[in-house]
Image (tube, grey):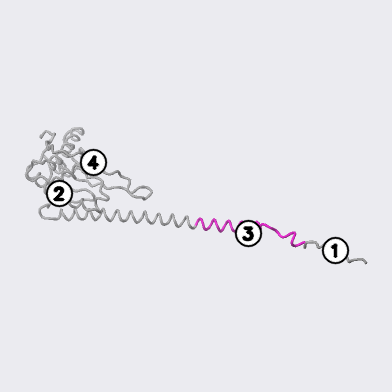
Amino acid sequence: MFGIKTPQRRPARDEAEKPFWISFSDLMTALMVLFLVAMAVALMAVTQGLRDIEQEKKDREATIQSCITDIDSITQRSEFKGVQVRGHAIEFGSLAEFDKNGNDLTLERKAFLRRLIPQILEVVRYESCQKWLKRVVVEGFASQEGSYLYNLNLSLERSQRILCVLLDANAADAPSVNDRKMIRTLFLVGGSSFNSTKKSPEESRRVELRLEFKDLCPSGQGKCDMPPPNIPWDEDSKCPITSR
């Protein structure tokens, strides 16, 4: 008896030729989608970072302007009439003028400075102001009479005289110890000879205070300036400048 021979089953042609990998076009489409998603996330991060930097700039400018406004309000008092705030500079006018070739001040002008500066320091102590205030430069000036180098030295002596007046612990109206410590930490002296003269020689023989503020870091993260140095305290109030 002969059996019926069943023919061997062959796999279908379409199963053998079905591709295992996705097509090249589908692969490129998927990669493009991933690239666009990555770019969108990166752009969002960059945009947010720029917004944060811009907001911090606005906050800094607003805080600095608020400090300047508070200081300006002090100068509007009748007892400080004649003092003006221009930009970040405090001008004393005739209230802190020097004699020709002189580096000393009258007793009245010394007393005036000892009354005014502690009032300004009260504003400087505000937490918002301390965040951005870098230093206070005492800038001395001279008239055009005389040589440049002579006047440069004279303007420096006038700046130093202001610190001698404010740090004199033996004066009857001396600023408090805390005020004098702050002055030693924040105040620096500078001389400009006759680089910035006024209309008359008398007006040019003067000193001004210039407030300098901290900058933002280029990355916008925090502040780049180093904190002020820790200067050892002493009570030596003897002024090294010879009066002339």
Name which of mark 3 and mark 1 comes first in the sequence: 1
Label 2 with label 4: CB-CB less than 8 Å: no
The part of the image, by quadrant, that contains residue 97 is: top left
Residue placed under numbered mark 3 in the picture = 26
Q: CA distance from mark 4 to mark 3?
A: 66 Å
**Magenta-highlighted residues:** 13-39
Residue placed under numbered mark 2 in the picture = 118
User: Given the image, on which type of amino acid does mark 2 rest?
Assistant: Pro
Name which of mark 4 and mark 1 comes first in the sequence: 1
Q: CA distance from mark 2 to mark 1?
A: 111 Å
The part of the image, by quadrant, that contains residue 7 is: bottom right
Numbered disc in front, either 4 or 1: 1
Q: CA distance from mark 2 to mark 4?
A: 21 Å
Can you give x and y, in whole percent of width and height, for residue 234 in the image? 15, 38
Q: CA distance from mark 3 to mark 1?
A: 40 Å
Residue placed under numbered mark 1 in the picture = 7
Q: Quadrant of the N terminus?
A: bottom right
User: Given the image, on which type of amino acid does mark 1 rest?
Assistant: Pro
Name which of mark 2 and mark 4 comes first in the sequence: 2
Can you give x and y, in whole percent of width and height, for residue 194 in the image? 20, 39
| Residue occupying the point 11% across, 33% down | 242
Relative side of 93 to 14, left or right = left
Identify the element where label 4 is drawn.
Answer: loop
Residue placed under numbered mark 4 in the picture = 230
Name which of mark 3 and mark 2 comes first in the sequence: 3
